[in-house]
Each structure stands twice: as structure tokens, then as C-alpha cells.
């Protein structure tokens, strides 16, 4: 392993990423070690993926047990881990049917295709328009970047799929003006993640559901980032009193193993008849065995209840820190999906805070150039939170001092 280093990246990898200088080699719970042996507290959680932290024994056991039984068969056959994971998801959510994919983008691709197909089957091909929101993020395939509301991700990739409109998030009048009987689906994140941890008003979410119902449009919730306990409920829709028709899940679903899922109702699922959609790896036994173990760990009242308490604890500490430095305009989010929006004097400097905090021993994320984001393990301990926040505070001190 000593033959490779961060410099190797620039020699051998396509330059679409710009990874940090340190190279992580080991993780345990909410701690990570780099190739030099330096220890870090992980508030990034692999971008809201490592819901149980690193190398949780339940995941390691599920993976190694399944690894000795059966890895892959394709969807020419079904398999027991996929069926039992689907059963768990159905027993605990609105869903009656499940489709498995390998990532969030693929789960959304399935969701958007299903919405089109359902509308075409039931109302005709002119009902094909998708309405989504500015700053939304749904993945990096051509269809999902097109539904996503950030132009920088579609520039230079034209021509894009058509029939997609964007309106302002959390603005019901804007949606009202755009929606029509040609709308097949409205797509939204119940909390915009990449867009800056934007929590919409409950009245907006309810209003979106009503408008969808008035126009026979499906409501698609992209819960790739908010799902699987991240907000303190299994899925964020459970806080809102609004039930979607289709929901996509990934990230925390596999706890670090790549898997995605699309959840829907029996009525809508009917449009994916044999041959309409598929995936070679989707629902493979290895991924589903790990996800089932992750599900069982997260779906415990004591784990889910702790999420809101940890949010409160971190919020209070961040606000206290801010009295000293005045770097945050607002601390927001739900559960352990948290954003600290930078004050006017520090606009555009999220990367500086992230780098300074890393040097002080904690991994944090950005959500755009003006928001620091945290998405730690749901199991992170109070001592680990304290140690990570102390590193963040030292990082902030350095940035403020220039
Ligand atoms: C991360 C993310 C995606 C994309 O998931 P991939 O696994 O990277 O394809 C889609 N939607 C949301 C809301 C996300 O946060």
C-alpha cells in the first residue's frame, strides 16, 4: 500500500474530484485514522451514509456471513436478503412495493421513470411534465441532474431530457402557477441537503400534497439524504403528516455498502410491468444483507430518540461557540442532518472552515460555499461530539484570526 499516496490521485484519477490531502485508512465508530496515524472525529459520516459509524459489528457480521453464502445472482432470481429487507421497509413505511438499485441516483432514476410510465398508462403521454425545485439535488445521471435544480451540474451536458420545470422551494404560489394537468410528478427533498440544509414549512409540504392531488400528479420524496433515521424518524416524511406516492432511499440505507431503494404504493408500482425497468446488481444479496442489519440497528426507539437529543445538544454548543465568534447566521436542520449558515462576513468561506477543522482533528462537510454541514453517525457519543466540536472551535478560531 505504501506505493500509493495522495499524489497518485492526480496521476491516475479523472479530475472530477478534489479530495482532501489526508488519506483515511481505518475507521471505528465515529473515529477515523489517516495514513500517518493521525486520529479524527467524524462529523461527515461519509456524506450522511455511515449512520452506524465505521465498521459497526452488526454490519461486519452481516457482510462476512453473507460473503460466505452468496454474493450475486442477478434478478433472473430473487434472493432471501432482498425479500426480507423489502418486508422490513414495507412493514415500517407507507410503501407496499419496493425496487432495489445501487445508489441514490439510480433510485431516483427509477422513481422518475415510474412517475412518467404511470402517468402515460393512466392519463396518456401528454401528462409527462416533472416539476422540481431550485437548489434541489437528485443525483448525477443525465435525468437526475436535469431534475436537480442546480445549473452548474447540467452545463455542457445538453441536450437534456425535456419536460422538466423548476420553481422556488418553500413557495407554494410558485408551484401553484406552474402545476397543471400535464404534470406527472412533483419531486422534492423533504429537507434540501446539498442545497444548504433547507427545512421547508410544514404548510408548504401539505400544500404540495394538495396541489398534486388536485392535478393527479404523483408526489416523489427524495429521501436519499434524509432517510433511515437521519432526522430522528425512519424517514423525514413522518415528521410532516404528508405521505408521498414514491420515495427514494440510499446513503444511510446501506450504512456504507452501496444500495438504493425506491418505495411506492401497489397502485403506482403496477406500471413497472415485467421488462420495463431493471438493474443487474440491484437487490444483490450482499448489499441487502448489510442493509437489513443496518435497518435493525437504526429502527430501535432508543436510537431514534437519541437523534433529536443529539441535535439539541450540538445546536446549543454551536450557538454558544457563535457568541464568541459570530461566524454563524443560523443553525438549522433536523436530527443529525445539521447546517450552520455562515454570517455575511464569511460568505463563500465554508471550505476554509472545513480545512481548518480537519487540521484540528475533525471531519465536517459543506453544503454549498456558505453552509457548514454535519451528518455524523446516529450512534456518536457525547464525548465524541465534544471532541469534534472542540476541533471545530479551534478551526473557527484560526479562520477568524486569519
Ligand atoms: C446524495 C444524494 C443523491 C445521489 O445519491 P448517489 O448515491 O450519489 O447517486 C440523490 N439525492 C439526494 C437528496 C442526495 O443527497
Image (spheres, rainbow, N blue to C red):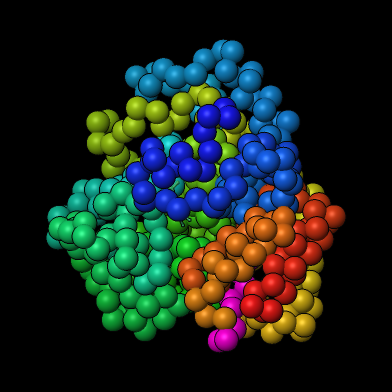
Q: Residue furthest right?
A: 383
- The answer to whether one can see residue 274 in this image is yes
Vertical side of 395 occupied by 348: above or below = below
Residue 329 drawn in magenta: no
* Residue closer to the observer: 65 or 76: 65
Q: Quadrant of the C terminus?
A: bottom right
**Residue range highlighted in magenta:** 337-345
Q: Position of residue 18 (x, y in %)?
A: 45, 53
Q: Which residue sits at x=72%, y=55%?
A: 361
Vertical side of 162 occupied by 249: above or below = above
Q: Which residue sits at x=72%, y=40%?
A: 37
Q: Position of residue 256 (x, y in %)?
A: 57, 39
Vertical side of 173 occupied by 118: above or below = above
Q: Quadrant of the N terminus?
A: top right
Q: Which residue sits at x=75%, y=62%?
A: 391
Q: Position of residue 234 (x, y in %)?
A: 62, 51
* Residue closer to the observer: 187 or 271: 187
Q: Position of residue 324 (x, y in %)?
A: 77, 82
Q: Residue furthest bottom?
A: 344
Q: Which residue sits at x=69%, y=24%?
A: 61
Amino acid at each position: 500500500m505504501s506505493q500509493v499516496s495522495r499524489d497518485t490521485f492526480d496521476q491516475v484519477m479523472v479530475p472530477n474530484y478534489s479530495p482532501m490531502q489526508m488519506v483515511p485508512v481505518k475507521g471505528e465508530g465515529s473515529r477515523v485514522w489517516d495514513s500517518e496515524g493521525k486520529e479524527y472525529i467524524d462529523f461527515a459520516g461519509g456524506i450522511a451514509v455511515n449512520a452506524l459509524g465505521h465498521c459497526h459489528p452488526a454490519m461486519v457480521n452481516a457482510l462476512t456471513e453473507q460473503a460466505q453464502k452468496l454474493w450475486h445472482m442477478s434478478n433472473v432470481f430473487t434472493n432471501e436478503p432482498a425479500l426480507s429487507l423489502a418486508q422490513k421497509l414495507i412493514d415500517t413505511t407507507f410503501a407496499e412495493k419496493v425496487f432495489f438499485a445501487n445508489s441514490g441516483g439510480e433510485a431516483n432514476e427509477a422513481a422518475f421513470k415510474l412517475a412518467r410510465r404511470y402517468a402515460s398508462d393512466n392519463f396518456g403521454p401528454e401528462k409527462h411534465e416533472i416539476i422540481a425545485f431550485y437548489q434541489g439535488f437528485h443525483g448525477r445521471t443525465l435525468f437526475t441532474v436535469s431534475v436537480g435544480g442546480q445549473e452548474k451540474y447540467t452545463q455542457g451536458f445538453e441536450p437534456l431530457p425535456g419536460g422538466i420545470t423548476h420553481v422556488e422551494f418553500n413557495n407554494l404560489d410558485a408551484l401553484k402557477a406552474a402545476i397543471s394537468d400535464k404534470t406527472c410528478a412533483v419531486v422534492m427533498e423533504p429537507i434540501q441537503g446539498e442545497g444548504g440544509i433547507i427545512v421547508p414549512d410544514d404548510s408548504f409540504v401539505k400544500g404540495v400534497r394538495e396541489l398534486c392531488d388536485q392535478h393527479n400528479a404523483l408526489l416523489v420524496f427524495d429521501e436519499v439524504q434524509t432517510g433511515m433515521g437521519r432526522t430522528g424518524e425512519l424517514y423525514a416524511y413522518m415528521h410532516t403528516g404528508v405521505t408521498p406516492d414514491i420515495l427514494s432511499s440510499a446513503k444511510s440505507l446501506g450504512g456504507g455498502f452501496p444500495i438504493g431503494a425506491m418505495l411506492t404504493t401497489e397502485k403506482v408500482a403496477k406500471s413497472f410491468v415485467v421488462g420495463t425497468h431493471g438493474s443487474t446488481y440491484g437487490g444483490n444479496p450482499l448489499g441487502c444483507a448489510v442493509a437489513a442489519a443496518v435497518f435493525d440497528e437504526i429502527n430501535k426507539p432508543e436510537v431514534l430518540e437519541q437523534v433529536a437529543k443529539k441535535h439539541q445538544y450540538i445546536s446549543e454548543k454551536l450557538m454558544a461557540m457563535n457568541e464568541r465568534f459570530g461566524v454563524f447566521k443560523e443553525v438549522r436542520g433536523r436530527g443529525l442532518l445539521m447546517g450552520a449558515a455562515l454570517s455575511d462576513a464569511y460568505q463563500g468561506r465554508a471550505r476554509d472552515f472545513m480545512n481548518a477543522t480537519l487540521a484540528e482533528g475533525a471531519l465536517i462537510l459543506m453544503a454549498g460555499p456558505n453552509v457548514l454541514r454535519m451528518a455524523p453517525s446516529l450512534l456518536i457519543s457525547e464525548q465524541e461530539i465534544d471532541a469534534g466540536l472542540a476541533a471545530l472551535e479551534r478551526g473557527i478560531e484560526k479562520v477568524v484570526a486569519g
